[in-house]
Amino acid sequence: MVGAGLFVGAFAWLYMQALSGMWADWSNDPNYSHGFLVPLISAYFVWQKKEVLTALTPRRSLLGLMIALGGLAMFLVGSVAGESFTIRMSMIVVLSGALLFALGWPIFRELLFPLAFLVFMVPLPYILYDTVAFPLRMMITKYSVEIMKFLGVAVLREGNIIHLTNTTLEVADACSGIRSIISLLALSTAMAYLFFKPMWKRIVLVALAIPMAVFANGVRVVGTGVLASYFGPEVAQGFFHEFAGLAVFALAMALLVGAAGVLSRIGRSRHG
Amino acid sequence: MGRRLLLVGLIVLGFAIYVQARPFHDRVPIKQDLSGFPLQLGDWRAAEYMLSDSVLEQLRVTNYLMRDYRGEGASVNVYIGYYETQREGAQIHSPRHCLPGSGWVPATTERRVVHVEGHRPINVVQAVYQKQDAKEVFVYWYQMKDATITNEYLLKAQMVLNSLKYRRNDAAFIRLSAPVKSTVPDAVASIEAFMADFVPLLADYLPE
């Protein structure tokens, strides 16, 4: 008990800044508002296994100690580089190492997924985020404009700016789809873990999250463009803009749930 | 199990004390405020620009300079952003991303070395961006201590290195651009002509 208390205290002290920074990101950056849910979902996964976990006897693994030390080294590199992503990831590594060291492999194996799931709470580093989000945003703009042209809307593209006859729309970072990609990846991973046993089904469901998010965002851009060209620029701002964001996420989620439904029918008699 | 957690706890605690006691980088103030940068450079005369609050909010620079220098038949836009220490959110952004967002599409990008007399060779990225019929040549580089860097990943590596070696990770981003009025080599020549007057002054502002 004293050991656990000391560990939690020291851990919290070391990562106080990283944790509050992450909290701020979740609150301020709409790309990461799902971050609040991730630790809760992880905790739920652990709680679900409480019987299995209490039935197993704790052992120890020296490898765990090595991993924890490796995590601390990671923290050092992260602080030196001013790179919060590395520091935040090291938190998961240190925690995993400590648990493995204190509890041993059999229990740790059960905890592995909930621990790994925590990765979704860590915002991507800026460099990587941009490398992915930017081309994605350009791609979505490009294809949406093609579709709008096909639908007979007079439209012109300039970078990620869409010129309509009566207004100009900017496909901003939020519309790149990366916001929904990361939230949907987290969601589909949780769903895959809860509902499916065979690995291939899990992988298929998680992989589907990406095209679905991209598709839903394309629908949003085209929808906004078409509506704005008919009803004027007000449509693209204010309430509709907010509403469209939610609707897009709902659409992507519906697609995901649909896919899960289809997957659960495939080979049900054999795999369950 | 409790004993083992106690051990890891003690290790983490010791580490936390060590980390708290020894900050990894100091703030390195700029030598002189960039707003004091000469408005007249050789034959070049400057018009000053302010960045909007929303842009500054994004960049979170410690000190910056944004000017248009006009010379004979040529004009060169200058941006310098200085960070006295780089932390999360307050880090150099790559122009690879902000330019295309506003409709400027990269046509060509190359890395090269520019030689300015009496000065160390400078590694730069030279890129031509296009927006409809307009073309603009950009020459930019990152400067950390005495190194000129053209790659964002190397910039990170240099940050680690400088923090370990000198306990600092301050950096400057320098970007020069000129519109292509006739040909690209002409625009490049204007930038290089400007650099001959401009680069020697940098040492008075950016810490080494």
Image (cartoon, rainbow, N blue to C red):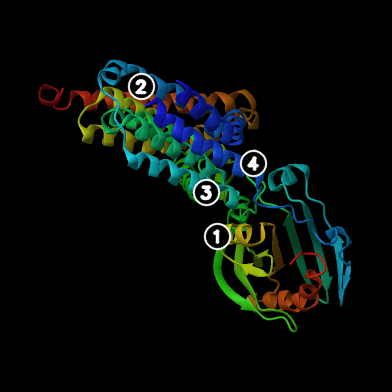
Q: Could you tell me which residue is drawn at 33 percent across and 25 percent down?
A: A191
The residue that mark 1 highlights is B157
Q: Farthest residue in the bottom direction?
A: B117
**Same-chain status of marks 4 and 3:** no
Q: Which residue is mark 4?
A: B20
Name the quarter where the C terminus of chain A is drawn. top left
Q: Is residue B126 above or below residue A112?
A: below
Q: Nearer the viewer, mark 4 or mark 1?
A: 4
Residue A21 at what x, y percent from top left?
Answer: 61, 35
Q: Which mark is residue A31?
A: none
Dot 3 or dot 2, earlier in sequence: 2
Q: Which residue is mark 3?
A: A134
Name the residue beneath numbered marker 2. A46
State the residue in front, A91 or A174.
Answer: A91
Disc 2 chain ID: A
Mark nearer the viewer, 3 or 1: 1
> Does residue A227 appear in the picture of this structure?
no
